[in-house]
Image (tube, rainbow, N blue to C red):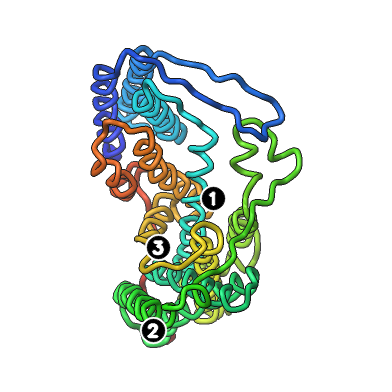
Amino acid sequence: MKHSMKNQVILSVVSAFGLLLAVLAPASQTVIRLRAQSDLLALADFAVAARPVSYIGANLLVLLAGYSWIRYARNLKNQRWVTPVFGLVFVAQVLVVLYAGKTLTLTALLAGSLALAVPLIFGSLAGVLSERSGVVNIAIEGQLLAGAFVSALVASLTHSLWLGLITAALAGVLVSWVLAVFAIKYVVDQIIVGVVLNVLVVGLTNFLFSTLMTNLAVYNAPPRFQLLPIPLLSQIPVLGPVLFNQTPIVYLMYVSVAVVWTALFKTRWGLRVRAVGEYPKAADTVGIKVYRTRYVSVLLGGALAGIGGAFFTLGQVGAFGKEMTNGAGYIALAALIFGRWNPIYAALAALLFGFSENLQFGLAIIGSGVPSEFLLMLPYVLTVIAVAGLVGRVIAPAADGKPYLKS
């Protein structure tokens, strides 16, 4: 029986776009800068000819798409490495063409992408924990926004970054507790509850911002976490400044991804969570407390999302603004689907979305000829493509979104 050709069709369409991009590529050169000031080894800049490199990239895209079609014709599943390699080649081609005649500072581009991805990663981890236990978490946006507001308020009043971070986690727990109570105890439609919570948190934070935070110097002037470079590691060329010259929240994010993955796939608790998310009746039969497991998973996810929200105020901006999460919760939801409900894959998907969002800023700074409206669309177009099935068929936990009624 033939499997779906969706992936092959998408690769073919993108390959055709790559060929068009090669034809339109300018004849100028793209200068690529790999070094940062703190690098242990000084790597020299190098230039590449945009048009020839673009043609090479386009041909590689066609070859990979053709290889995918050959496997489909032989009724073989597409190998996992094809799509990631295809994506990397396409991104490299696009960067070389868009930065033609300019300098592409790779370290700055990657560092900005990571910064934008941090709240998305925390949000996607919240979704993974919740949905692995069978509760759809549409309220990630509200949890991020609540964390951002509370962290700014508490840190401003107490001048304590860590207290602001802790209360942000508690704010996320509060929002997720409301979701859990209505979804688990009162068996209300989980998607409706999540949407309502998002609207509620937006309205509540906007109201409090307009009334309570009118005195910005007192209520909305939190300190920010400073960069904390790790000796030697932060001086590794290219990736060192990106990964190891970050704020404590980013390092906490690294730990969170590792801990959530280990907890879900290497511990007895994680096995119970996944059992509850797949077949709660069978889990209940063998003595697993379904309701308690779901409550704990949703609340833990809310705490992580709250910390992700604190990154907006304590790690980036240094102040709270109305609706400052700007749909990050929904992109995080797409990232966890793109990542197949796996913490590591979801984090990588979030990094991809962060890269696409940062790319629009970089292109705007260098004065790219690409229309600004198209640049603003980039993260959301990528979200649609991802959810539409670029990664192939994705299957949610069997009991995801389905309330459990103990008989």
In the image shown, does 259 or 288 lie closer to the viewer?
A: 259
Q: What mark, if any, has residue 344 been given in the picture?
A: 1
- x 36%, y 78%: residue: 210
Instruction: State the image coordinates of residue 133 (x, y, percent, origin top left).
Output: 48, 69
Amino acid type, mark 1: Ile
Residue at the disc numbered 3 = 325
Judge the density around disc 2: few (<14), some (14-19), many (≥20) Cα neighbours within 10 Å: some
In the image shown, does 100 or 13 lie closer to the viewer?
A: 100
Q: Earlier in the sequence, mark 2 or mark 1?
A: 2
C-beta proximity under 8 Å, tags 2 and 1: no
- x 45%, y 68%: residue: 320
Q: The N terminus is located in which quarter?
A: top left
Amino acid type, mark 2: Phe
**Does any portion of residue 282 appear in the rendered image?**
no
Instruction: State the image coordinates of residue 353 (x, y, percent, origin top left).
Output: 41, 47
In the image shown, does 179 or 398 lie closer to the viewer?
A: 179
Residue at the disc numbered 2 = 182
Amino acid type, mark 3: Thr
Q: What mark, if any, has residue 84 been given in the picture?
A: none
Instruction: State the image coordinates of residue 299 (x, y, percent, origin top left).
Output: 52, 75
Q: Where 354 sits versus 199, above or below?
A: above
- x 43%, y 84%: residue: 181
CA gap between label 3 and label 2 equals 24 Å
Q: Where 8 sits versus 197, above or below?
A: above
Of the two numbered discs 1 and 3 in the rendering, the one whose residue sits closer to the viewer: 3
C-beta proximity under 8 Å, tags 1 and 3: no
